[in-house]
Amino acid sequence: MTMTTVITTAPAAAAHLADAAAATVLAYALHTPAGTTFPAAAAAISRPVTWILAQLAPIRAVQDLGPDLRTGHTRYQIAHPIVTEVTLIAGALVALAEHDWAQNDYEDELGRVDITGALRLAAGVHPRDLPDDPHVLDALYTAEDCLAAALGHDPTQLDAGEQVAAWQDHPDRTLDQVHALLIDVVTGTCR
């Protein structure tokens, strides 16, 4: 079996993150059911892998989930993760760094994902599937609500997932804008 590494260029929004905000994104991403690989986390927050390792050195509760089937890199997760909408959004940021970004489909033929597909990967399922765990499913839907609200939509009035998809599928949308939205929600800029 051939392993490939797919890491996109660092998002412009992440390049301007303060270390505390970058550490927050990392901590949240480690709380997702899917966990994260260190190279993908580093790419998502524009930090070297050595910075990731330094942040995790004092944390004893980081567990090895085994190799990522796509890249071969080890996946890590906090022991007994607390899954919330914010952890899934942070995980989606990492999933976009791992899989790259697609428009108009949860996952395209190259394995790239849109925001919804990235959220589902963070939830530990295939981009086209929904999680079986009701708590994780609720966090997934709440994540879509948060993103829609950050875009100025009322998720009680409109389908949040459809609003997020319409925004990200706009032909002029850029990956940097997608990253900026996710980072703003995770770091509290939009709340």
Image (cartoon, rainbow, N blue to C red):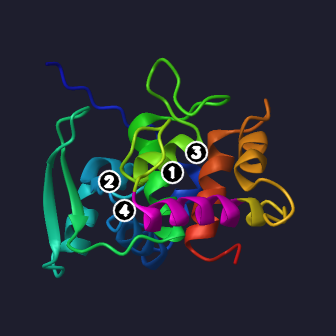
Relative to 145, does residue 42 appear above or below in the rendering? above
Foreground residue among 141 and 66: 141
Task: Tell me the quarter of the image containing the N terminus.
Answer: top left
Q: Amino acid at mark 1?
A: Leu
Q: Which residue is labeled 3 in the image?
A: 116
Q: Gap between marks 4 and 2, in whole Å?
A: 5 Å
Residue pictured at 66% horizontal, 58% vertical: 181
Q: Are marks 1 and 3 in contact (CB under 8 Å)?
A: yes
Relative to 156, does residue 71 appear above or below in the rendering? above
For label 1, the SS is helix
Residue pictured at 34% horizontal, 48% vertical: 40
Q: Amino acid at mark 4?
A: Thr
Q: Which class describes the residues within 10 Å of circle 1: few (<14), some (14-19), or many (20+)? A: many
Q: Which residue is labeled 4 in the image?
A: 32
Comes first in the chain, label 4 or label 3? 4
Q: Which residue is labeled 2 in the image?
A: 34
Q: Position of residue 111 (x, y in %)?
A: 44, 26
Q: Are marks 4 and 2 in contact (CB under 8 Å)?
A: yes
- Residue 25: within the magenta? no
Q: Position of residue 107 (x, y in %)?
A: 52, 29
Q: Amino acid at mark 3?
A: Thr
Q: Gap between marks 4 and 3, in whole Å?
A: 15 Å
